[in-house]
Amino acid sequence: MKDSLERLLIPELARVEPGAARRRLRRRAFFCALDNWGWLIYLLIFVIIYVVFEVVATECCSWLGVAYRRWVRAATRGLANGVGFLLALWVLRIRMRGSVRRQLIQRGLPTCLACGYNLTGNVSGVCPECGREIEQP
Ligand SMILES: [Zn+2]
């Protein structure tokens, strides 16, 4: 279950043998996605989602002519939490995949940085999956 979910979310990880090496790769990718000021992105996502939802809910209430009651506020914040969480997870996934691809290249496993395609044996210098030019060492 955990393995198939991982294959769905970060398919590039399957190119490294399961075990310590893959765990190390995953951990490095996770911290890479949060390093420097990267964690601010996730905070910003929540702030923006909260503001947008608050404004939309207030506008909807006044348009419908109903009071902005406590339960409306609770529902709005609950929804904002859910959407913010999913969005933050999505961004985390994108950033982790980028880091995994860079790490695969460092390990001598040719990988397309744009789409993650396995470029082993590629001689054309162009990714057959997405058409991006390959910049390998
Ligand atoms: Zn590609």
Image (tube, rainbow, N blue to C red):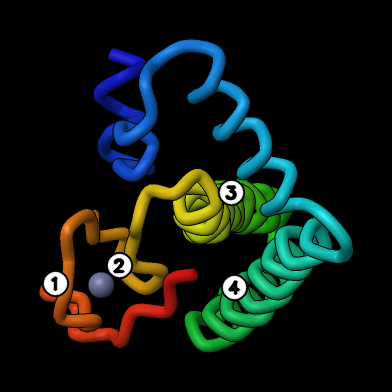
Q: Position of residue 7 (x, y in %)?
A: 28, 33
Q: Which mark is residue 85?
A: 3
- The amino acid beneath tag 1 is Glu
Location of mark 2 (residue): 115
Q: CA distance from mark 4 to mark 2?
A: 38 Å
Count residues near mark 3 (Cα–Cα under 10 Å), then give few for <14, some for 14-19, many for 20+.
Answer: some
**Sequence-earlier tag: 3 or 1:** 3
The residue that appears at 86% across and 65% down in the rendered structure is 37
Residue labelled 1 has its Cβ within 8 Å of some atom of ligand 1: yes
Task: Please give the label number shown on residue 13.
Answer: none
Q: Are marks 4 and 3 in contact (CB under 8 Å)?
A: no
Q: Badge 2, how many Cα within 10 Å: few under 14, some, many 20+?
A: some
Q: CA distance from mark 3 to mark 1?
A: 31 Å
Q: Are marks 4 and 1 in contact (CB under 8 Å)?
A: no
Secondary structure beneath disc 4? helix
Left/right placement of residue 65 relative to residue 127 reads right
The residue tagged with tag 2: helix, strand or loop?
loop
48 versus 99 height, above or below: below
Name the foreground residue: 26 vs 48.
26
Do the CB atoms of the residues marked 3 and 1 lie less than 8 Å apart? Answer: no
47 over 121 or under it: above or below:
below
Q: Earlier in the sequence, mark 3 or mark 2?
A: 3
Instruction: Give the numbered dot on residue 57.
Output: 4
- Does the numbered disc 3 mark a residue whose Cβ is under 8 Å from ligand 1? no
Count residues near mark 1 (Cα–Cα under 10 Å), then give few for <14, some for 14-19, many for 20+: few
Precedes in sequence: disc 4 or disc 2: 4
- Regarding residue 58, the answer to whether it shows in the image is yes
* Amino acid type at mark 3: Phe
Of circles 4 and 2, which is in front?
A: 2
Give the residue displayed 59% in from the left and 73% down from the top: 57
